[in-house]
């Protein structure tokens, strides 16, 4: 039997991190000890109170049945209360909060609710690969917005041709930013709101890293800006905030009709989120202060070790104010892929080539600060031994 993939599958490259996993396996099989700075998966444990709440909730038979599609009101109320405490934003938990099986799932499904074949979605480059792929799955056309160093890795909305803006249904933005670790301040979000109003575009702000910030900096919510709730939604995840990547729990908040559209897609695709995990999520949001000071202190130290070491060997990297990523310019004479290959083959150091996040990521690699300080110091020593 001849198996033929759908055209939409042919359109998309293999998922970046799945490809990196293959390369890691190949190098490991040669007996090389790897220091993995590739994927942004926290190595720190989930806080104890969250685990205890899960254990208790998992023993309750009522949680063994199908959950509600939109999410338990207890979890959605915890989200609304956290938003008010953290950002001063009032949300109606019944209509302006939707639970997600991780924010990736919500981001992947939202184009299905709003993008018709041939419609445009405005997608940052470099950017989280799911923005582009989810647009393609919906039959849409990604229009890439370059994130360049000279503009603080913010998209220049005035560069978007009017013909494109008029066809656009969605605008994806993500601050603090993955992969560049850039931050956005109020004037940028105000510009986004004005742009979205002018062209009737839905803004999808991915705020997964809002609680990973350093030196006392507190990232804004997009929804803090006047008029934002009228034009968009914000995606959040408990993954990075509470070291819960494997738990798959997140949420979207904002415009009730936009969330309703996303909810209609989800009711036909998934059956909601295990209630015991939602109870654990409510525990996290209700009882733990964010950002978690002990987590931030660890990442700050790691950041300082790596930035100092990389700068001493002449690599260009900014000291990030948020996220646990370093966005590093590759030395002259190398492409992103060539430099990432050199580091894994000669140093056993796994990084992510910048072009995997989009064409505008060429010339950079990303490192994640998700291994302990001792291993990071070892990574620096290994890097010093590589000739580049």
Image (tube, helix red, strand yellow):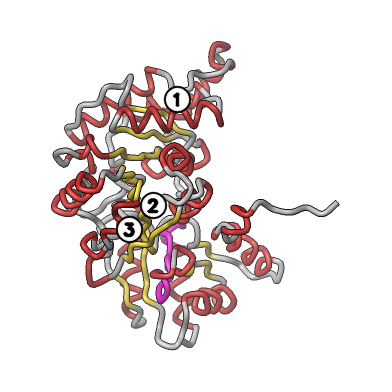
Dot 2 or dot 1, earlier in sequence: 2
Residue 310 in the image, given as x and y percentages of width and height:
36, 75
In terms of secondary structure, where does tag 3 sit?
helix
Task: Locate residue 137, reporting x and y percent.
Answer: 53, 48
Q: Check disc 3 and report the residue beneath it.
A: 164
- Please give the label number shown on residue 278: 1
Q: Residue at x 27, y 22 (%)?
A: 92
For the point 40% across and 38% down, the residue is 238
3 or 2: tag closer to the N-terminus? 2
Residue 258 seen by the camera: yes
Residues rendered magenta in the picture: 361-374
Q: Is residue 30 above or below residue 87?
A: below
Name which residue lies at 24% across and 47% down: 196
Mark 2 packing: few (<14 Cα in 10 Å), some, or many (20+)? Answer: many
Question: Do callouts 3 and 1 mark residues in contact (Cβ within 8 Å)?
Answer: no
Magenta-drawn stretch contains 371: yes
Question: Which residue has dot 2 on it?
Answer: 121
Give the quadrant of residue 146. bottom left
Please tell me how many numbered marks the rendered image carries. Answer: 3
């Amino acid at each position: 039997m001849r198996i033929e993939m759908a055209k939409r599958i042919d359109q998309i490259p293999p998922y970046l991190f799945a490809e990196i996993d293959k390369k890691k396996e190949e190098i490991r099989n040669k007996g090389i000890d790897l220091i993995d700075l590739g994927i942004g998966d926290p190595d720190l444990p989930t806080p104890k109170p969250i685990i205890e709440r899960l254990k208790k909730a998992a023993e309750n038979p009522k949680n063994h049945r199908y959950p509600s599609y939109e999410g338990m009101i207890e979890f959605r109320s915890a989200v609304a209360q956290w938003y008010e405490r953290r950002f001063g934003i009032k949300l109606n938990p019944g209509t302006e909060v939707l639970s997600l099986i991780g924010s990736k799932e919500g981001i992947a499904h939202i184009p299905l609710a709003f993008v018709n074949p041939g419609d445009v979605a405005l997608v940052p480059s470099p950017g989280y690969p799911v923005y582009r792929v989810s647009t393609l799955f919906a039959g849409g056309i990604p229009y890439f917005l370059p994130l360049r160093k000279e503009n603080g890795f913010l998209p220049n909305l005035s560069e978007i041709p009017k013909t494109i803006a008029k066809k656009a249904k969605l605008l994806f933005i993500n601050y603090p930013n993955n992969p560049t670790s850039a931050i956005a301040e109020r004037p940028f979000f105000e510009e986004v709101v004005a742009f979205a109003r002018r062209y009737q575009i839905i803004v999808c702000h991915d705020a997964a890293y809002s609680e990973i910030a350093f030196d006392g900096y507190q990232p804004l919510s997009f929804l803090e800006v006047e008029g934002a709730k009228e034009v968009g939604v914000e995606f959040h995840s408990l993954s990075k905030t509470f070291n819960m990547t494997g738990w798959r729990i997140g949420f979207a908040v904002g415009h009730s009709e936009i969330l309703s559209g996303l909810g209609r897609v989800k009711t036909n695709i998934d059956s909601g989120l295990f209630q015991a995990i939602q109870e654990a999520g409510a525990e996290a949001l209700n009882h733990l202060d964010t950002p978690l000071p002990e987590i931030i202190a660890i990442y700050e130290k790691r950041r300082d070790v790596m930035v100092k070491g990389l700068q001493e060997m002449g690599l260009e990297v900014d000291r990030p104010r948020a996220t646990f990523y370093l966005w590093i310019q590759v030395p002259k004479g190398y492409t992103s892929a060539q430099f990432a290959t050199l580091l894994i083959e000669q140093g056993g150091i796994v990084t992510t080539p910048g072009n995997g996040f989009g064409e505008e990521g060429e010339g950079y690699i990303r490192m994640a600060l998700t291994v302990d300080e001792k291993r990071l110091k070892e990574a620096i020593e290994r890097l010093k031994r590589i000739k580049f």
